Amino acid sequence: MGETQDLLQGIYGLDSKGNFEDVKRLPAALSLPEVVATRKRLEKSLSDEEQAGLKRPEAVAKLVKEAAFTHLNRLVAFKMLEAQKLVRGTVDRYQESNAFKFYLAEHEEDYKLYEQGSFPQNEIGEGPRDRAYRHFLLWQCAELSKEIKVLFDPENLASWLFPRPRALKSLLEMLNDPALQEAWREEETVGWIYQYFNEDEKKDVFNRLYKKKQKIRTEDIPAATQLFTPRWIVKFLVQNTLGRQWMQMHPDSRLAERLDYLVPLAGEIPAEKIKPVREVEVLDPACGTMHFGLVAFDLLAEMYKEEMERAGGPGWPEKPSVSSTEAIPAAIIANNIFGIDIDLRAVQLSALALYLKAKSLNPKAVITESHLACAELQLPDDAKLEVFL
C-alpha cells in the first residue's frame, strides 16, 4: 500500500487529498506515454468517484487499497497455481522463472529488452529487463482472465498501477520464503490472506467502537466482519442444507454415509421434489473467500457422480446433468454456486478459490462462467438519494 501511495504521488502527481500536480512538472509524464495515459485514467476515476458521492481523499484511499490488494491477490494466485502445477513457474524465481523464459521465446521485443539487462532505468525505476517481466506478468494475467476476469483483468486501473521493481522484488522474496512452501498447496490459505490483509484496520475499528464510543461507519463493515469460519461449522451448515435437500430428494443416496454432521430429524423426513443436480443452487450472500462454497463444491461433485451412476432408475432423473466426470468441475461453477460480498477482495479471492478447486479436480477444465458479484454500493448523500428514490 505504501508503494502504491508513493507511485501515485511521485509518478502521477496525485496526493492523498486527491489533488493533481501539473503534469508538466512530472518527469515520468514528459518521457513515458503510458504514464500520461494512466494519469488520464486516474483523473477520470477520481471524477467518477466524486460524482458518485465519494470525497476525493476517500477516493484516493480506496484506490490505493484496491490496487494494493489486487496485485497481492494476483501474486498469491500465481504461487498457488505454481504449487498445484497448473502453471509453469511465474514468480518462484523472479526474472529467472521458467514461464518467463518460455514467454520471451515467443515475444521478440521483450526478449530484446531482457537481453539489455537491468540498466539504464527509466523515470519509473524500471530497467529493460524489469519492463519485460512486467509485460510478462500482465500477459499471464490476460491469459488467466479468460476464466477469472474479476481478479486478472489486465485492463483495469489497478493493472496500470503496477508495483515498481524494488517493491515487487521485496514482496516476491517474502512470498517465496521456503517456510511458506506448504501453505500454497492449502485451499484455506486464500481465506487467511483475506482475513489478515487488514488486521490493523479491524483493530482500529473496534478501538473506535469500544474505547472512543464512536459508531461504526459503512466503510468499516468489511474490516469489522471478516472472520474465518472454522471448517466444522461450515460442514455442519452445508450438510444440513445442501446435504439435507439431497437426502430429501434421494432417501436411498449413498452420500448419507459421508454426511457426518447431518442431524437426524424427528419423525418422517419430508420429501423434496426431484430435480437434476445442475438445478440445485447454493447462495452464500456474504461469501468472503468462498469457504462455504468450497465445502459445497466437494459435496456437489459427489452428487453429480451419483446422478451419473443412477440416472434412469426409480427416483432419479432420466438423464444425468453431465456426460462425464471431467465436465463436473466447470458445471458446478457454471450452474450451482453463487456468491455475493461487499468487498471486492473477497470476490477476487472467491473466484480464485473456485478456480483452484475446479482445476484440482480436472486441470483441463475450462471455466466459461461464474456467478459472483461485488455489492459494494456507495450511496449518494440524502438529497441525491431522495431525488433518486
Image: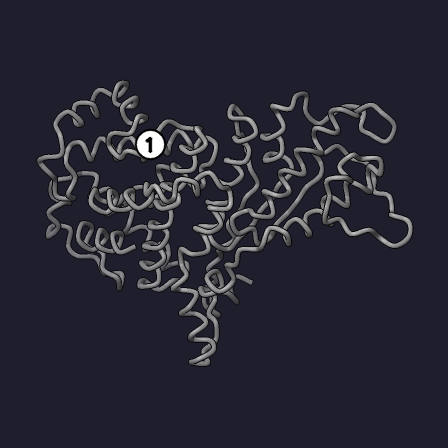
Taking the spot 31% from the left edge, 58% from the top edge, the residue there is 60
**Which image quadrant for residue 48?**
bottom left
Q: Which residue is mark 1?
A: 90
Q: Quadrant of the N terminus?
A: bottom left
Say whether residue 369 is left or right of residue 124.
right
Q: Quadrant of the C terminus?
A: bottom right
Q: Position of residue 166 (x, y in %)?
A: 20, 45
- SS for tag 1? loop
Q: Position of residue 353 (x, y in %)?
A: 51, 41
Residue 99, above or below 68: above
Q: From this viewpoint, which residue is outermost toward the left? A: 120
Whether residue 217 is visible: yes
Residue 53, above or below 83: below
Mark 1 is surrounded, within 10 Å at the Cα level, by few (under 14), some (14 to 19) or many (20 or more) other residues, namely many
Say whether residue 388 is left or right of residue 21.
right
Look at label 1 and name its amino acid. Answer: Thr
Residue 164, above or below 278: below
Say whether residue 233 is left or right of residue 129.
right
